[in-house]
Image: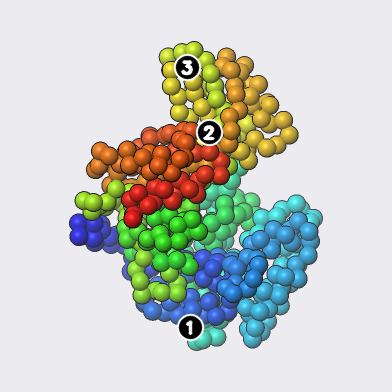
C-alpha cells in the first residue's frame, strides 16, 4: 500500500497529453498496427504516437524484423523482402506504398554513393510511421505525420554514438505542442534524428524509446506510455525465467540499473529532470496498467529486490602491482589508456595489489587492439597485465535492498547452492550489486537468484 500511495503523490502534473511508443513487436502486421491505433483512441489524452520499425510477425517461423532486413540490404544490396513487407502491411493504401518502395531504392542508392548507411537503417521507422498515419487518416481520424526534422530533433556524436542534442528541447516543444493541438493523432518515427548538417543519424538499437523520452520531455507530458509485447517490466528475462513476475513500480534509477529488461536504459533520462512518469504496458492488454516508473517509491516491507539482469561478453584485464591501492594516479593512467582507444570500462574493482578492468570483449576484437591496450597499460602503470577468462554478469537491483541486512548474503548463498563461482563483485551503490560469473553460467545465476527471492 505504501508503494502505491507514494506513486500517486509523485505523479507529474504536466500537459494533458500522453506520449505513447509502440515497439516493433506491436507493429509487425497490419492487424497489429490497427490495434495500436485503437489503443491510442481509447484515451483522449493519447495524442502522440512514437513508432518503431515492424518487428517479427507472430506465427511466422524464422521471421526477420525489418531493421535486420535493412542491415542485410545495406550490406548485400537487395531489398525485395522489405518491399514485400511494406506491400503486405500497406495493402489497399494506394500511392503511399509505392512511394515508400521508391524511397527505399533512393536511400540504398545514396548509401552506395555516399557511404552513409544510417539513412537506410532509419527507413523502417519512417515507413512504419507513414503507413500508420495513412491507415488512421483513412479511418477518418485527423492525423499528422511528423518527421524528426519537422520539430528540430537534433543529435550529436558522443563516444562513437549519436545521442540527442540537449540544446534542442525548447525548439522541439513548441512545434510538437502545435501539432498535438491540431490533430487527434500525431505519428512520429522513432530511432533517428538529424545532425547539424541535416543528415539522418540513428541512435543505438532500442532508440525509439529514447525518442519517446525526449518527445515527452519537450512536451512536458502528463505520462509516457511504452507499449510492448509483455505486460510490463519483468523481474527477469522471461526467456530465462518463464514464470518471472511483472514489477508494479520502479524508479528511474532502478530502471537504468536494470536497463535491457524491455526498455532502453536511456529512455528515462530526459524524463528525470521534470519527474515525468512512464508506464510500460502491453499493447495486446491495454487495460492492464503494467509497470509505472517514477522518481522515487517506498517499497513494501518484505521486498528485497526489484529484478535481475544478465549481461554477457565481458573480458577481464587484471593489473597486478604491489601497492595499487596506495599509488596516486594509477587508476587515472589505466583509464586514460582505455579512453585513448575509445573503450568504455564497465567495472574497475581493486584490492591492495590488484585491479581489474572489465570491458566488453567487442571493443578488443579489432586487429592488434588487445595487444596494443595491454602494452600501453604495462607502460603507463608499470603493472603486469593478464587477460583472464571471459565472464557473464548479473545485475541485482532494487531500492528494497538497502532495507535488509541479509540481501547480499541471500544472493551469494543462492549462487553457492547452485554451484556458481563468483569471479567479480561490484557493489558501488546501495540499491544494486553486479556479480561476474563464468561465461555461460549467467542464465543459471539469474534463475538461482530469482528463485531465492520469488519462490
Q: Secondary structure at mark 1?
A: loop
Q: Give the residue at x 53% y 77%.
A: 32
Q: Give the residue at x 36% y 40%.
A: 413
Residue carrying label 2 = 358
Give the left or right position of residue 168, taking residue 86 as reference.
left
**Can see residue 366?**
yes
Pointer 1 local density, CA inside 10 Å: few below 14, some 14–19, many at least 20: some
Where is residue 37? Give x, y as percent. Answer: 48, 78
* Distance between the alpha carbons at the discs numbered 2 and 1: 52 Å
Q: Nearer the viewer, mark 1 or mark 3?
A: 3
Quarter-wise, where is residue 76 in the image? Answer: bottom right
Q: Nearer the viewer, mark 2 or mark 1?
A: 2
**Can see residue 221?**
no
Residue carrying label 1 = 141
Where is residue 270? Give x, y as percent. Answer: 42, 52
In the picture, the disc for residue 353 is 3
Closer-to-camera residue (247/328)? 247
Amino acid at each position: 500500500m505504501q508503494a502505491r500511495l507514494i506513486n500517486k503523490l509523485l505523479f507529474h502534473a504536466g500537459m494533458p497529453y500522453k506520449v505513447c511508443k509502440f515497439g516493433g513487436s506491436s507493429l509487425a502486421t497490419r492487424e497489429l498496427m490497427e490495434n495500436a491505433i485503437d489503443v491510442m483512441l481509447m484515451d483522449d489524452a493519447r495524442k502522440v504516437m512514437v513508432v518503431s520499425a515492424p518487428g517479427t510477425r507472430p506465427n511466422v517461423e524464422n521471421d526477420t524484423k525489418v531493421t535486420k532486413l535493412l542491415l542485410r540490404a545495406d550490406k548485400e544490396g537487395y531489398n525485395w523482402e522489405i518491399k514485400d513487407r511494406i506491400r503486405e502491411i500497406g495493402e489497399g493504401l494506394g500511392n503511399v506504398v509505392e512511394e515508400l518502395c521508391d524511397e527505399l531504392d533512393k536511400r540504398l542508392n545514396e548509401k552506395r554513393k555516399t557511404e552513409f548507411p544510417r539513412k537506410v537503417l532509419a527507413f523502417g521507422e519512417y515507413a512504419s510511421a507513414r503507413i500508420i498515419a495513412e491507415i488512421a487518416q483513412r479511418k477518418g481520424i485527423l492525423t499528422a505525420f511528423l518527421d524528426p526534422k519537422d520539430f528540430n530533433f537534433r543529435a550529436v556524436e558522443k563516444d562513437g554514438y549519436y545521442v540527442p542534442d540537449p540544446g534542442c528541447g525548447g525548439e522541439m516543444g513548441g512545434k510538437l505542442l502545435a501539432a498535438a493541438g491540431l490533430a487527434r493523432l500525431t505519428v512520429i518515427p522513432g530511432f533517428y534524428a538529424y545532425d547539424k548538417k541535416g543528415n539522418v543519424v540513428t541512435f543505438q538499437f532500442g532508440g525509439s524509446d529514447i525518442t519517446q523520452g525526449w518527445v515527452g520531455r519537450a512536451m512536458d507530458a502528463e505520462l509516457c506510455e511504452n507499449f510492448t509485447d509483455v505486460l510490463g517490466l519483468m523481474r527477469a528475462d522471461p526467456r530465462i525465467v518463464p514464470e518471472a513476475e511483472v514489477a508494479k513500480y520502479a524508479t528511474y534509477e532502478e530502471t537504468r540499473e536494470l536497463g535491457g529488461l524491455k526498455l532502453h536504459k536511456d529512455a528515462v533520462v530526459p524524463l528525470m529532470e521534470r519527474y515525468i512518469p512512464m508506464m510500460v504496458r502491453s499493447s495486446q492488454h491495454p487495460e492492464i496498467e503494467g509497470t509505472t516508473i517514477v522518481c522515487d517509491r517506498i517499497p513494501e516491507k518484505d521486498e528485497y529486490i526489484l529484478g535481475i539482469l544478465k549481461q554477457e561478453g565481458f573480458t577481464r584485464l587484471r593489473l597486478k602491482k604491489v601497492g595499487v591501492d596506495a599509488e596516486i594516479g594509477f587508476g587515472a593512467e589505466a583509464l586514460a589508456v582505455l579512453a585513448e582507444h575509445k573503450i568504455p570500462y564497465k567495472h574497475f574493482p581493486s584490492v591492495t595489489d590488484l585491479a581489474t578492468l572489465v570491458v566488453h570483449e567487442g571493443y578488443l576484437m579489432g586487429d592488434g587492439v588487445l595487444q596494443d591496450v595491454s602494452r600501453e597499460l604495462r607502460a603507463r602503470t608499470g603493472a603486469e597485465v593478464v587477460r583472464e577468462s571471459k565472464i557473464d554478469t548479473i545485475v541485482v537491483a532494487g531500492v528494497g535492498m538497502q532495507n535488509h541486512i541479509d540481501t547480499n548474503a541471500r544472493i551469494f548463498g543462492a549462487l553457492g547452492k547452485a554451484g556458481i563461482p563468483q569471479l567479480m563483485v561490484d557493489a558501488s551503490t546501495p540499491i544494486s550489486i553486479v556479480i561476474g560469473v563464468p561465461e555461460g553460467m549467467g542464465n543459471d545465476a539469474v534463475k538461482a537468484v530469482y528463485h531465492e527471492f520469488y519462490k
